[in-house]
Amino acid sequence: MPELPELEAISARLRLALTGRRIQSLTLNKPSCLKTTEPKLVALADNRIITIIRLGRFLCLGTDQKLYLCIHLMQDGGLCLCPAHHPMTTSNLLCLHFDNAEDLRVTEGGTRHRVQVHLVTDPNKVAWIAELGLDPLGPDFTLNRFRQALARRNRTIKRFLTDQRTVAGIGGCYSDEILHEARLSPFQPTVSLKPEETIRLYAAVKRVLHDAIVYLKALDHLPDRRDRTFLQVHGRAGQQCSRCGSAIQRVSDEKSITYYCPGCQTGGNILANRSPSSSLPPQELASWSNAACLPADRSLSSSLPLEGGGNKREGDRPLSGPLK
């Protein structure tokens, strides 16, 4: 579920809580979540956390012994910082036990079991990290580089924004918000963008992500989906657009749901549901089933219910709890 804004807030709070802390021991309850075999996970014992960074939609914990624990929460994953004496639950995949009697627990609800944990000596040894595109918060995310990325391949703007090889960190939720802010249709082809539309889209990426990060960092707990009360269109089908008053609509293909405002984004037109064959150019269809290459809103983003509800995690509130 977490996208760039949530992971920025999470990493900032975890840096305050865990930097300098020593990992006393580890508990791996779901070995299938560990995607690497060397170094051994036990090598993390007695390491101290010296850095916590976000790379795309990965959270990477770096240690004083030059090991990196890279975590992708995928669709149903979460993090929980809690006292070590709290009972383990079936949702706890991996627990890091620290020297201050606190745990950092990687959790996952549902039955998909897709959370990924990689222990490496260099984050770029994780293929998905090595292939990440421009980071919207990085110095290379300039208007000129953004234009170049748009021009490389013709596809819908939604696909462009959520392809981690192009723009890192954005998934289905914030791509919807960005397109609403830019007043652009999610299915508009990238090659059809006019110069002023490209500028609007670039500015919307910066503004939407910045505003979300500021809001989420001000919370007194690690954010989760329930904190996305500021969203304008995503998950708000049937509600009125705050800008023009039109009813928010949603449209789906076989892999994702997109939320948009007809009044602001499509000239009043209601978009029809699409199948992959009708919504993607031929070159996109060739990689449709390649999970490693799918954009975040189709292989890496949240499948948790977006309009109410949620996956219960047996007493845990993932990503929550004030830091001490």
Image (cartoon, rainbow, N blue to C red):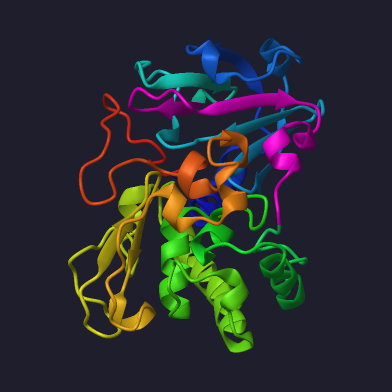
Q: Quadrant of residue 17?
A: top right
x, y percentage for residue 318?
38, 36
Q: Residue furthest bottom?
A: 196
On-image quarter of the N terminus: top left
Q: Is residue 263 above or below residue 31?
A: below
Q: Residue furthest left?
A: 238
Q: Is residue 209 above or below residue 223?
A: below
Q: Is residue 324 visible?
A: no
x, y percentage for residue 315?
27, 27
Q: Quadrant of residue 53?
A: top right
**Left or right of 62 on screen, residue 190:** left
Q: Is residue 182 above or below residue 140?
A: below
Total marks placed: 0
Q: Quick check: is 110 in the magenta stretch? A: yes
x, y percentage for residue 54?
64, 47
Please give the name of the residue rendered at 53% of the width and 76% of the height, measured from the top-left corner. 204
Q: Is residue 90 above or below residue 136?
A: above
Please give the name of the residue rendered at 25% of the width and 39% of the height, measured from the top-left corner. 310
Q: Quick check: is 318 in the magenta stretch? A: no
- Depth order, front residue of 253/117: 253
x, y percentage for residue 268?
28, 81
Q: Is residue 88 visible?
A: yes
Q: Quadrant of residue 71?
A: top right
**Left or right of 230 on screen, residue 103:** right
Magenta residues (range): 104-133
